[in-house]
Image (tube, rainbow, N blue to C red):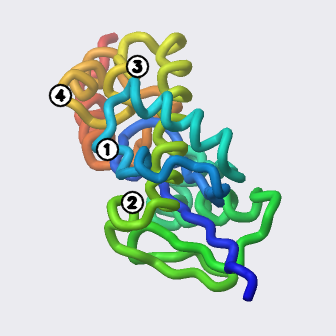
Amino acid sequence: MRELITAGVDEVGRGCIAGPVVSAAVILKKNIDLKLLKDSKKISFKNREIISEHIKNNSYFAIGTASVQEILNLNILQASLLSMKRAVEKLTIKPGLTLIDGNFAPTGLNNCRTIINGDEKIKVISAASIIAKVYRDRFMIKLSKKFSNYAWERNFGYGTKAHLESLKKFGVTSHHRKAFKPVHKILSSLESQPQEK
């Protein structure tokens, strides 16, 4: 009996207040070193970079993103699912089974299974979480060169104390998710301040 081709899918950036949401879909090849694969959050930045390259060299993978505008138009859950669907649809080999981290799956994909904490339990989902995390981190580092006030090269768009302080001081960029509570709160307070004549 032929082995079912299985893809793992995970997203990164749902909890951020800036930047896109990014998903990866991965189908592992036989020569992957499974010992390296675990939840991306439990691997250091430097090691993630190295392991991500190993995965890319020993798998079929694709990246899907949803923009800040799509996050604001759809909501973060629907944008995350959209990025997942885009990643799966970009795979050059079509999976017979798709394992998705979390408890929601995109509509219109065949034979999907959702697994809560899948990035900790299932190696192919761990691989997807690593590739998605490295891709998104690199994107935010690149963006931080243009928007140096927000330290995205360190916080990657998460709402850290320093990031929120920078928002108050320097205002909101086009890469910030304006409907997200911390950003919306700052925007509202700025709008309510009396304008200088």
Whole-angstrom CA distance, mark 2 to mark 4, is: 27 Å
Q: Kindly tell me whether residue 142 is visible in this rendering.
A: yes
**Considering only vertical position in the picture, is 11 above or below 143?**
below
The type of residue carrying mark 1 is Lys
Q: Which of marks 2 and 4 is in front?
A: 2
Q: How crowded is mark 2: few (under 14 residues within 10 Å), some or many (20 or more)?
A: many
* Image point (25%, 42%), residue name: 182
Residue 153 pos. (x, y %):
40, 19
The type of residue carrying mark 2 is Asp
* Image point (42%, 66%), residue name: 122
Confirm or deny contact between disc 1 and disc 2 (CB under 8 A): yes
- What kind of element bears circle 2? helix
Q: Which of marks 2 and 3 is in front?
A: 2
Please report whichever mark, 1 or 4, sits nearer to the chain's N-terminal start: 1
Whole-angstrom CA distance, mark 1 to mark 4, is: 20 Å
Residue topped by disc 2 = 119
Please report whichever mark, 2 or 4, sits nearer to the chain's N-terminal start: 2
Q: Which of marks 1 and 4 is in front?
A: 1
| Residue 161's disc number | 4
Residue topped by disc 3 = 153
Front position in the image: 157 or 92? 92
Q: Residues within 10 Å of mark 4 (few under 14, many from 20)?
A: few
Residue topped by disc 1 = 41
